[in-house]
Structure formats: structure tokens, C-alpha cells
Image: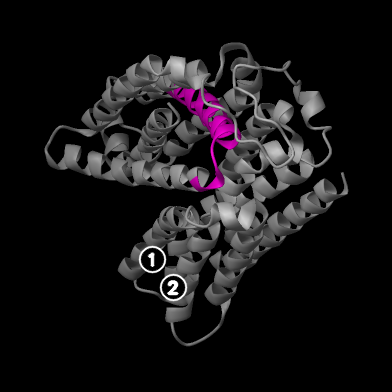
Amino acid sequence: MYSLLLAIVYVAFISLGLPDSLLGAGWPVMHQDLGVSLGLAGVLTMIIAGGTIVSSLASDRLTRRWGAGLVTAVSVGTTAVALLGFSFSPSFWVLCLWAVPYGLGAGAVDAALNNYVALHYAARHMNWLHSFWGVGASISPFIMSYALSAGWGWSSAYRIVGVTQVVLTALLVASLPLWGKVHRVAPTGEHEETSGQRAAHVPLARVVRIPGVLLVLTAFFAYCALESTSILWAATYLVSDRGVDATAAAAFASLFLLGITGGRFLAGFFADRVGDRFLIRGGFAAVGVGVVLIALPVGTDALALAGLVVAGLGCAPVYPAIIHSTPVNFGRENSQAVVGVQMAAAYTGSTLAPPAFGALSTWLGTGVLPVFLGVLVVLGLVMSERLNRLVDRR
């Protein structure tokens, strides 16, 4: 049962990544077909992000009442319906309506599934699962590209991914009896307990008062802000400020994402031996090295391009390790509530940081990108180290 459910969870993580790159890949065509400006993609992403934040904050109450398996199945089903709704939308404003259930489904499943894995599986699986999310996110642009090149239109790509999510929903529903039979991973000195034992809901006001929660929220916000800003602005920085050829800049910007995906796969092989703290500390430190390489005022582009790859590899283990360490840092009884708030902080950072840097760059230029990223690295590392000291004093 352990291995069977784990295989289903791996498939779920691939499916989670599938919708995330569709909008970016298809929007150059979508906005023309819908007769709206290119910039309105930001409205859709803001609506989706708002839904994910709301459902992440509600995930503790939902999961304690219905269980992680049912919440995951219903959330994936909700996302599937929203994607199919996207595929039949005749106008931009109908897309906005479907973006609401899209975001609500994505946030709930992310929080529920991440916490379930943190409680029931080893650190290596958390890293590998998030690597599989990257596989899904990498596949969806190819689905969009194929649909467009075949003359099917962007709506067909959404329909393909939506039907895939429907199939996954059926698989998750069929697997529901397994979710309560997998025993939790017990940290040293603690006994195992089954997932069927549920404590009371932890209100948000109480969650943020748990010692260390504000520290981890700040660290998670900083990490996700760092990742999303790098993804959006790295290529522009390389072209505008370092004079790198646009083709080469785009290729190395994609290597940042591939570094995250590949790095998580590699981290899975030693995550159980070195522990979550080392992965978080080493990850932030590696990103810092990458940022320094990007910023060095030398005559060659090689160091800047290498720095982008190093930064991607450094980013790889941070997100999974923060999630996986939650039950140990805050207790199993609080972990679902804390993970939900962490997801909300993550989406907030990912949503706000790129436009914030865009506004900053209009005054100071894109050359300030390494400084912006460096501040986020220091903030994330300092907050995570303060959390470690606080946990050690308990």
C-alpha cells in the first residue's frame, strides 16, 4: 500500500505541474484570439494566485474534516473542471471566472498533498516529488506548442490537460481507501501514528502565534520571491545589462528551471543523510554564490551564465526541505495549518516580487537585479537560521 499510494502521489505531482506553464506558453496566441491586450495576463495570474492563497489558508480545516485524500481528489477535480472551462471560454472575462476555481483547487491540493508527504514519507521523496512537479511544468509548454502547430488552437491544449486531470481525479478517488493506511514517518523519540487520527482545527490567529512561524513564513516568502523574480527577469538582465545574446540568455534562463528540477532529483539521493536544515542552509548559500557570479563585473559572460545555473541548483532543495521540516519544527498537530500558511506565503511572494522588481527597475534599471536577489537570499537564510536556533532551545 505504501508503494502503491506513493506511485499515485508521484503521478499527482506531475499533474500538479501541468497547468502551471500553460498560460505563459499560450498567451501570445490567446490574447490575440480573445482580442485583449498582452498585459491582461497579469489579471488572470492575480486571480489564480488569490484563489490559491484563500484555499491554502483553508486547507487545515478542510483536511482535518475530510482527510488529505478526499481534499486532494476534490481539488484536482475542481482544477480539471476549471481547465476544461478555460478550453471552452469565448472571452477573456469568462476566463477570469474560471480562474477562480482554478486557483481554489490548486492551493488546496498543494497544501494537503505537501503536508501528507511531509508526515508520511522520507525527505528523499519530498525532493523527488517536487522534481516530478518540474517535469509536469516542463511538459505543458510542449503540449501547447503541439496543439498550436497542429492547428488545433490553444483551447485544445487546455482540453488535453483538463482531461488528464479528470483521469487523475478518478485515480485519486479509487485510491481513497489507501490514504488512511499508510503510517506516518516518526521522528526520533516519537511513536508512529496513523493518518486516521485527526486533531482539532488550528485557527489562523493561533497559527501565526506559534513560536517560529513568522520566521519560516518570511523565509518561505523570500525563497519564492527569489525564484519567481529570477525566472521572469534573469534573461532580461543578461541581455540589457550584460550584453548577452538574446538566444543564449533565453537558453540559460531555461537552465535555471532545469537546475531546479534536476537539483531536486539529485538532492533526493542524500536528503535523508544530510537532513532538511543542511539542504536549506546549503541551498541558500549556493544561490548566494550564484548571485555573486552573476553580479561580478568581468569581461566575460561565462561567469554570469554559470551563476544562473548555480543559483538554480541552489534553489532546488529549499522549497521541499522547508515543507518536509514542518512537522518536526512545529509539531504534527500543527503541521497542516502551518503548511497551509506557508503555501499562502509562497504564493504571495511569487505573485508580488516580480512586479515589485519591475517597478524598481523603472527607477534604477534592471542592473539592480543581483542586489535584489541578494537581499532575498540573506533574508531567507537569516530567518531559517533563527528558526533553527529557536527550535534547538525548546
Q: Looking at the image, which residue is at 80% across and 25% down?
A: 205
Image mark for residue 305: 2
Q: Quadrant of the N terminus?
A: top left
Circle 1 crowding by C-alpha within 10 Å: few under 14, some 14–19, many from 20:
many
Where are the magenta residues, as a range? Answer: 97-124
What element does badge 1 sit on? helix
Q: Can the viewer see residue 355?
A: no
Q: Is residue 59 magenta?
A: no
| Magenta segment main secondary structure | helix
Q: Quadrant of the C terminus?
A: top right
Image mark for residue 252: 1
Q: Is residue 114 magenta?
A: yes
Q: Is residue 386 left or right of residue 370?
A: right
Residue 279, compared with residue 202, is above or below; it is: below
Residue 347, located in which quarter of the rendered image? top right
Q: Mark 2 belongs to which amino acid?
A: Leu
> Horizontal and vertical percent for residue 282?
62, 63
Q: Looking at the image, which residue is at 65% across and 29% down?
A: 192
Q: Is residue 281 left or right of residue 38?
A: right
Residue 360, located in which quarter of the rendered image? bottom right
Residue 348, compared with residue 240, is above or below; it is: above
Disc tally is: 2
**Which residue reaches farthest top?**
65
Residue 386, compared with residue 369, is above or below; it is: above
